[in-house]
Amino acid sequence: MKEWMTEFRKYLGTNYPVLESSGVDGLALVDELRAAVCENINLYMEKNEEEFQGYLNDFVMAVWSLLGNVTQSSSRDQLAMVAIKFLTTVSMSVHHTLFAGAGVIPQICQSIVIPNVRLREEDEELFEMNYIEFIRRDMEGSDLDTRRRIACELLKGIATNYKQQVTEIVSSQIQHLLTSFAANPAANWKDKDCVIYLVVSLATKRAGGTSVSTDVVDLQSFFASVIVPELKSQDVNGFPMLKAGALKFFTMFRNQISKDIAAHLFQDLVRFLLSESNVVHSYAASCIEKLMLVKDEAGRAKYTGKDIAPFFGELMTNLFNAFKFPDSEENQYIMKCIMRVLGVAEISREVAGTCITGLTSILMEVCKNPKNPIFNHYLFESVAILVKRACEKDPSLISAFEARLFPCLQQILANDVTEFFPYAFQLLAQLVELNSPPIPPNYMQIFELLLSPDSWKRASNVPALVRLLQAFLQKAPLELNQEGRLNKVLGIFNTLISSPSTAEQGFYVLNTVIESLEYGVIAPYICHIWAALFGQLQNRRAVKFVKSFVIIMSLFAVKHGSTNLVDTMNAVQPNIFSMIVKQFWIPNLRLITGAIEIKLTAVASTRLICESSALLDAANVELWGKMLDSIVTLLSRPEQDRLEEEPEMPDIAENVGYTATFVRLYNAGRKEEDPLKDIKEPREFLVASLARLSSLSPGRYPQIINQYMDPANQAALLQLCSTYNCPIV
């Protein structure tokens, strides 16, 4: 080690005048060598601290003096960053006492931190020429490899052991820089930028929360005296980097700024959407969007539609106008803000019209060449939330929205814009659900397209197509029974359940068929449906598939009666129903999750044991007892106690060579319908049904319960009988 460390130490301290004076290339070679040494000694600090400690003092002094001579040129960034990183590692180690000497921390702050936090020409160029990269580094935290961020990390490192000293020194530096700015704001604006950056970078996040805190300034007075004047400035284009810093500060400390103060600044944020600087109007949009998410102490939204109502029209106009600035045509921060505001605001008919016009014209444009998936996602979410909130409030808007959206959706489908297919189908599903039967003819054309097997060949489309098919099944049950359409739907169901990757989607289709159609309509097909499912059960016993099967049988039983369930199953194969109950229903009932699903399966199972002759038969007494045991497990034990689900292995072969994915639109989601709205509490339904049944044959059922039920479940059942005053006699 001694030989190596002597060499390393020499490289850091020796000058190479011939190379260093020969221009940028020669200096770059020397910097590369020194950066490599700094990386090595940093590794020694992290991995072999004990063996390295004898050399540490010399290296700290060498790196410190080296940093004093590294200029601000961007060509020397790599050396500066690895050298500062080494000092940061030392500051957080047991050897932090090397920084404890008199004047060391102030010296580090003045000679290393402040010079590296100050804006350079390169930063200003990036701000103006490549706003996306600037924001990525500045706002989204990917700037760990910039001098500004790494210099602040050094301060944070030292503060882990010398917090008070660092706080005092940084506070006095801040005062000094603010005094300099006040003396000549136009010339010294970078001093104020440096202050804002320091406070933001040294803020600490509270554990487990979204709020941040700072010790280097008094937050409220700093906000009022340093940040608010920038936000209140009438010139939205003057000193854009200061404006961006102030907006970033407001965004970061939004949870700590009181509602009264923030409400007075909302209109200023709206003004900044018209700043010519891409960073400034992006930060203004981001600030508004993040404010919409702030919660009060009770967990409710702090800012509501009423708070933005006075300037809502102006806000939407400015947001749409911001897309007209060069390079902001597909600005994801503005689109995300539109989405968030539309989710909160009270939308009038006029503003709804303006918004749908604005969004569809952007959609027409991006269809020509989709290139920014994040922007496109927020665009479709914005359309979905606008359709949902405006049309549900005022159904007379539906036809105007359709007139605007149909040309866009037709362009997506006709021009094979495959990236947008899943979005288009989800929006169509939303529009179908808003219509009252009979469904308009233009939708029926789409229905025909939907029933063609070719539409289902692309796996990424399947969940969205299922969503659309469910909407049609619900809204057009009469049309479904015409022209062989139901046959085609069941053909789609068959295809979906035969593949492990789409089986769940197949069950969604079947769910809607059973729920939406009369028994007389599906009766001719039901035996074929059971046969297809039985065939799959022979080959596949995956938990997810069997749970879906139990849910389907339960839904059929509550919608069309347990007698029809038993008879149609036994028509496929004599006495198969008892075998299905024994092998699949009873063992998997306890694995059901989801409030609606638990209620559905519990009620269906209760009806089977209390009303179905198949289970009330004396020959099936054991099945009866075990089914009741399973129902009580489902209803009385917490989810974590009754689930022993194995993680299922995905079928890798199904996904090879496939890249496009389905992205769900949160705002176009299907409302889950409860098929048993009249039954409030499945536990009460169970014991009331058992009490009625036992009164017909007193003494019979307590005996079966004792024989076939788990003792813990017997106790739970007695407790339920007592709670609802329904004794089993």
Image: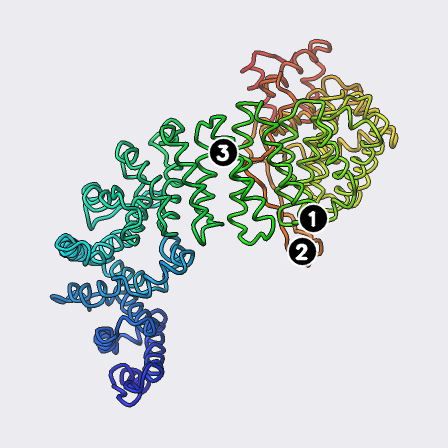
Residue of label 3: 354
Q: Secondary structure at mark 1?
A: helix
Q: Earlier in the sequence, mark 1 or mark 2?
A: 1
Please rate how many residues cluster around mark 3, counting C-alpha atoms within 10 Å: few if below 14, some from 14 to 19, many from 20. Answer: some
Q: Quadrant of the rendered structure where residue 173 is? A: bottom left
Q: Which residue appears at 21% of the width and 49% of the height?
A: 215
Query: Residue 36 placed where, x, y %?
Result: 36, 78
Q: Secondary structure at mark 3?
A: helix
**Looking at numbered disc 1 in the image, what kind of residue is underneath it?**
Ala
**Looking at numbered disc 3 in the image, what kind of residue is underneath it?**
Thr
Give the left or right position of residue 347, taking residue 445 as reference.
Answer: left
Query: Residue 488 placed where, x, y %?
Result: 81, 36
Kindly indicate whether the residue at mark 2 contacts the one at mark 1 (C-beta within 8 angstroms). Answer: yes
Residue of label 2: 658
Q: Secondary structure at mark 2?
A: loop
Q: Report the mark closest to the observer, 3 or 2.
A: 3
